[in-house]
């Protein structure tokens, strides 16, 4: 059955388009850069197609505090050392009590990965224990719960299976977040594998890019994947990993949504629902790909931006 689903996914690959249409599924992986605070205004502009965002933390970013059509999705990034800690639960419940529209949450960023690559490095047993204490109570308040966002490696797939085993039926996730760094064929195959294992859950693609690809290949990957996500009904949300300048991109400069000067690239403009800009990202001063390790430097500032 698994191979059938994977083959069906590959057979449904869309053609490459030169421009992307608008989509209510699109969101923002918000990674603010304190050196360029003006870039924050791009993502919530009147012309932006984005409907939601997350920032790897439990609290919304002050920069978007006045946004009306830009829903914040809290994340429990890792597991606290104190096994009685309920700070994440308290934070989300406080936001709900204050009138915030918290409909979804995300949990455990790449728990099978290390901090060196942006992972939370949490064991499946500890994650299950933390989920039952900090996440599961939100179910009764109508919040949809995202399963741990593991890496796209086989170790991630195995970690997720171990997590649900450790939960012993006490972790009622509503959707599976996927991270993928690689070409489109691999992405479609991975989605097929996840769908085969968890056929009753919808899927969010919360990080994806083709690291190190040249500009033509990066644009083809972006267009193919976005068209594919929009066509598949069980993929309900997606967020491209590229909301930064090409000069600091750790997925290659050509995958970034902003040039080194803060202008929208073709990919950036397409993602926001616009037309190609013709602005070419610079290949100078970029960082080699290391998962989402850019977060190690920048996520410190998420709550201040």
Image: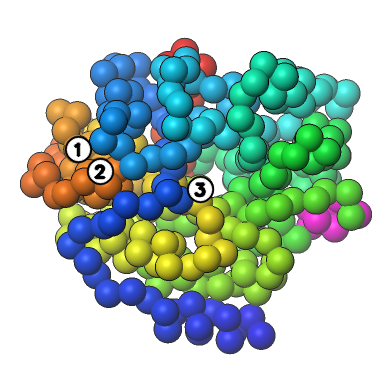
**Which labelled disc corresponds to residue 268?**
2
| x, y percent for residue 28 | 42, 38
Secondary structure predominantly adopted by residues drawn in magenta: helix
Which residue range is magenta in the image? Answer: 162-168
Q: Residue at left 44%, top 39%?
A: 51
Q: Residue at x 75, y 61 (%)?
A: 161
Residue 40 in sight from this viewpoint: yes
Q: Are the residues tagged 2 and 1 within 8 Å (C-beta)?
A: yes
Q: Is residue 230 left or right of residue 174?
A: left
Instruction: Say which element carries label 3.
Output: strand
Q: Which is more toward the observer, 303 or 180?
A: 303
Specify how the rendered protein is coloured: rainbow
Quadrant of the frame with the N terminus = bottom right
Between 253 and 74, the residue placed more toward the observer is 74
Left or right of residue 174, residue 114 in this image = left
Badge 2 marks a residue whose secondary structure is helix
First of labels 3, 1 by sequence position: 3
**Secondary-structure class at tag 1:** loop
Look at mark 3 in the image and give the residue it sits on.
206
Relative side of 277 to 141, left or right? left
Disc number placed over residue 264 in the picture, else none: 1
In three-dimensional space, the C-alpha distance between marks 2 and 3, rounded to whole angstroms, equals 16 Å
Q: Position of residue 46 (x, y in %)?
A: 28, 30
Residue 144 is covered by the magenta coloring: no
Q: Is residue 164 magenta?
A: yes
Would residue 21 appear left or right of 207 to someone viewing this image? left
Vertical side of 225 occupied by 258: above or below:
above
Q: CA distance from mark 3 to mark 1?
A: 21 Å
């Amino acid at each position: 059955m698994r191979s059938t689903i994977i083959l069906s996914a590959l057979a449904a690959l869309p053609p490459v388009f030169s421009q992307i249409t608008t989509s209510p599924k699109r969101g923002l992986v918000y990674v603010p850069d304190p050196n360029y605070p003006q870039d924050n205004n791009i993502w919530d502009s009147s012309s932006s197609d984005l409907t939601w965002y997350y920032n790897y933390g439990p609290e919304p970013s002050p920069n978007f505090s006045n946004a009306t059509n830009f829903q914040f999705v809290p994340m429990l990034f890792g597991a606290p050392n104190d096994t009685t800690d309920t700070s994440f639960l308290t934070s989300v419940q406080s936001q709900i009590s204050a009138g915030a529209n918290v409909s979804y949450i995300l949990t455990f960023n790449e728990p099978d990965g290390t901090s060196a690559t942006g992972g939370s490095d949490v064991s499946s047993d500890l994650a299950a224990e933390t989920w039952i204490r900090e996440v599961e109570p939100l179910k009764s308040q109508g919040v949809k719960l995202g399963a741990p966002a593991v890496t796209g490696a086989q170790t991630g797939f195995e970690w997720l299976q171990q997590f649900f085993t450790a939960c012993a039926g006490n972790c009622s996730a509503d959707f599976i977040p996927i991270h993928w760094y690689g070409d489109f064929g691999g992405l479609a195959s991975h989605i097929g594998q996840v769908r085969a294992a968890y056929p009753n859950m919808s899927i969010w693609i919360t990080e994806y890019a083709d690291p190190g690809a040249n500009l033509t290949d990066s644009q083809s990957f972006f267009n193919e994947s976005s068209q594919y996500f929009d066509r598949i009904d069980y993929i309900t949300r997606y967020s491209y990993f590229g909301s930064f300048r090409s000069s600091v991109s750790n997925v290659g400069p050509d995958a970034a949504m902003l040039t080194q000067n803060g202008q929208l690239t073709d990919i950036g403009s397409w993602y926001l629902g616009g037309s190609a800009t013709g602005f070419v990202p610079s290949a100078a001063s970029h960082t080699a790909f290391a998962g989402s390790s850019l977060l190690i430097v920048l996520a410190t500032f998420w709550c201040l931006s």
